[in-house]
Image (spheres, grey):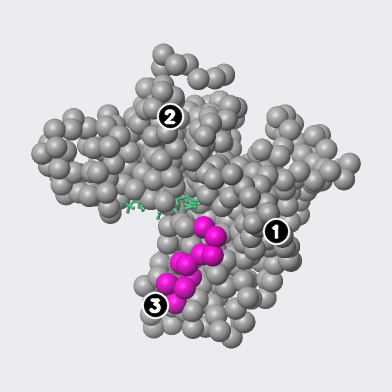
Amino acid sequence: MGCDVSHPQRITVLGATGSIGLSTLDVIARHPDRYQVFALSGYSRVDELLALCLRHRPAFAVLPSSEAAARLREGLRAAGCDTEVLEGEGGLCQVAAAPEVDAVMAAIVGAAGLRPTLAAVEAGKKVLLANKEALVMSGALFMDAVRRSGAVLLPIDSEHNAIFQCMPGDYARGLSAVGVRRILLTASGGPFRETPAAALQDVTPEQACAHPNWSMGRKISVDSASMMNKGLELIEACWLFDAAPSQVEVVVHPQSVIHSLVDYIDGSVLAQLGNPDMRTPIANALAWPERIDSGVAPLDLFSIARLDFQAPDEQRFPCLRLARQAAEAGNSAPAVLNAANEVAVDAFLQRRIRFPEIASMIEQVLEQEPVLPVATLDAVFAADQRARELSREWLRRHGR
Ligand code: NDP
Ligand code: MG
């Protein structure tokens, strides 16, 4: 493998207007000889998508509705840009699976990204996976599709990209076969790492979204604050590396300099370090197995000076416990956890529930909804829909 200079890789960026999408386009723009943008998608930020189209000149752009698409077409026409605008989930799946595409950045947030991401997998693409919710919801089906299609799945989540870098090349043989004892998944602890339990009642969406180390979209920022992000990442790690939940230990590391570690049976522990900037894992996955400049400043260990580690506090952050339980229950449980979390985070961002109620709501939905096998994508979405309905019922019951 390598870079064929006569054919720059054509990249589809799903979720181009988001935090990961913009970081991806920043890395791509540093290497015009290697990468060319094939398609970009947005959702609510139409003007931003227009500006990205004018800058990167993709063949296609995708928006959710015909109204949004018409607005974008008008802007493109006025600027003399011949990008073709597609609509809806069908458009997303089309640009994810198009024969011209070499790699797809899956950076839509939440369950909405599942079908387009799977379309890229089923078309055998190189899939750069940021949309962890897709894998959490449908892990078994997703990984089966990867094996069947021969897609190359590369993790973008900084922890999973770190683990990937610390694993031997043949880790697909199984963790014990390659001498891995466990995975140490690091967590920053988020903005409320030191906030007393009682004070969590009154934290605001603005405080939850002000992450100390990372600048991210609002949903993942709230997930980081509740530590549900680490719970989703635990499930993500189990699928990506074929690990049992008991083989993944969460380690709170407030500086976010070590992005995760792999503990081998001979006592060696390998870690990947770097400044907390998503352009590093993005560049790593884009160029893999080569290395390219990402624009990230070199790590200055002297200015960091120290690295701290703590055990996570599952009393204050019950989402982590709930996610571990869902990982152990398997089947539909992770999809239910994810859907209830999406509704809860949305309600918290709209100030309809208090921060600790995110966990209460998810816990009750998990208790109400039976764990069922999910052998098809329809079964996954049925579990997702039932969990959303139970979550909305919870809101009604509590008068929100
Ligand atoms: P953002 O909220 O910044 O971006 C989300 C993107 O998805 C935007 O392009 C948005 O469009 C689009 N989008 C939102 N809703 C829909 C929908 N219903 N259908 C289609 N597209 C939609 O999120 P992030 O970039 O922070 O995160 C993206 C994914 O990457 C998440 O799954 C997150 O967990 C994961 N991730 C993010 C990290 C980060 O550092 N940000 C780190 C690790 C993982 P628009 O903006 O136009 O509305
Ligand atoms: Mg992460």
Image point 64% across, 60% down: which residue? 255
Q: Is residue 384 left or right of residue 75?
A: right
Q: Which residue is mark 2?
A: 31
Q: Which residue is mark 3?
A: 352
Image point 67% across, 51% down: which residue? 301
In the structure shown, which secondary structural element does the residue marked by tag 1 occupy?
loop
Q: Is residue 270 left or right of residue 206?
A: right
Q: Is residue 49 left or right of residue 318?
A: left
Q: Nearer the viewer, residue 54 or 227?
A: 54
Distance, label 1 to label 3, CA atoms, is 42 Å
Q: Earlier in the sequence, mark 1 or mark 3?
A: 1
Q: Is residue 205 magenta?
A: yes
In the structure shown, which secondary structural element does the residue marked by tag 2 occupy?
loop
The image quadrant of residue 256 is: bottom right
Q: Earlier in the sequence, mark 2 or mark 3?
A: 2
Image point 49% across, 40% down: which residue? 295
